[in-house]
Amino acid sequence: MQVSERVNNLAASATLAMSQKSAELKAQGVDVINLSVGEPDFPTPTHIKEAAKDAIDNNFTFYTPVAGYLSLRKAICEKLRRENGVEFAPEQIVVGNGAKQALCNVILATINPGDEVIIPTPAWVSYVEMVKLAEGKVVEIAAPIEQDFKITPAQLEAAITAKTRMVLLCSPSNPTGSVYTPDELQGLVNVLASHPEIIVMADEIYEHINFGAEICSLASFPELADRVVIINGVSKAYAMTGWRIGYCACPLPIAKAVNKLQGQYTSGASSIAQKAAEAAYTGSQECVETMRVAFERRRDLVVELAGQIPGLKVNKPQGAFYLFPEVSSFIGKSYDGKTIESSGDLALYLLSEAHVATVDGAAFCAPGYIRLSYATSDDNIREAMKRIADALAKLA
């Protein structure tokens, strides 16, 4: 059977692929510690689950507006005003099936074939593939660990051409955990201010998982206020990955275009999940802080343990729940007759030899690195890092 070139040209999600391999080994009885998956290991807070149960009992079981319930969009607007200091109207919000769909919606609604989209790398695995789906052209700006994985204004200016349509920035970052300071963002804003034709997409899904960094939304800069799209959702901050609720907050023409697009291929997101998300935004935020504190403790633990492993080069991420160590010192080494020729080989070696699942940095446009998610228990982190240390010590 023939499939479309559109699908043939897409890469499979490396994070989901590694998670699948981990699950297959576990099904065979292998004790695998999965550090590949990017989701909180906490259950959804009780008051949010209760809101979903109430929604079922009160018959919120019919189609919703394509853009989402008005009450949820109002709650999102209030959240943006209260926490981010930015003003959006409900008609500028489109709720989708997770932040992933919201991102893809905006890209498909704004990018024409040949348009250039600037993406700082390392970057989340799906950004590049979404741009390819829209037939746009990705322009990567590499920011290695020596730059704390953050691009400079000079790099941004040099990447902009007459074909640049969008700049996509994620802070706190997946896969690195790096956070741009307000001053660093201002430097990028100063560049973008002189290019009014460029849409700025700010993926802020990890904003609440930060460790002392001052979080600042790109939409709060007046120079960009009329062309910033915020992407966010409930998955990470409220441990609601399976509920699939995210949103885009957009300039009105983009919101209308996204609404039109979503109306043709998914319509509104789950009515029950929307009511749960509304409770997340309007209820107590104590649960968010409780999880944040746990992630900070785990961050400190994994950085300490990884820093003790000879050959691993690590930084100290200021947000999200990922560590992105540089592993090039292991390339070319061997064990049991097998040579590590890439960071992908190293990730597979750690899975087979240490029974720890990680993700190849090449999936994030950064070969020579691997991604570790520390969204797991302290005990799992300690055991995983011991296994990794022992496995890497075998390479010669």
Image (cartoon, rainbow, N blue to C red):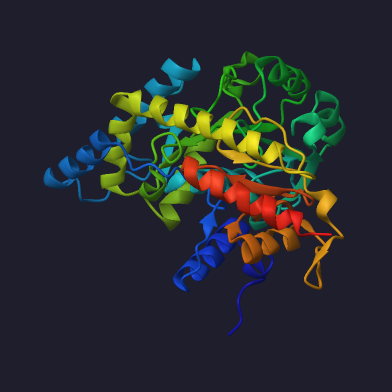
Residue 201 image position (x, y, % from top left): 62, 34
Can residue 134 be seen here? The reply is: no
Quarter residue 153 falls in: top right
Q: Total label count?
A: 0
Asked if residue 94 lies left or right of residue 70, the reply is: right
Q: Nearer the viewer, residue 317 or 300?
A: 300
Q: At x 65% / y 16%, what residue is drawn?
A: 182
Quick check: 270 above or below 395? above
Can residue 371 be seen here? The reply is: yes
Q: Nearer the viewer, residue 359 or 386?
A: 386
Quarter residue 321 falls in: top right
Q: Quadrant of the C terminus?
A: bottom right
Q: Nearer the viewer, residue 209 or 132?
A: 209
Quick check: 390 above or below 94? below
Asked if residue 285 lies left or right of residue 160, the reply is: left
Quick check: 177 above or below 370? above
Residue 170 image position (x, y, % from top left): 63, 35
Residue 224 image position (x, y, % from top left): 64, 21
Q: At x 58% / y 61%, what residue is drawn?
A: 355
Q: Quadrant of the N terminus?
A: bottom right
Quick check: 30 above or below 378? below
Q: Nearer the viewer, residue 251 or 117?
A: 117
Q: At x 71% / y 16%, what residue is drawn?
A: 186
Residue 228 image position (x, y, % from top left): 60, 28
Residue at the far left: name it. Answer: 57
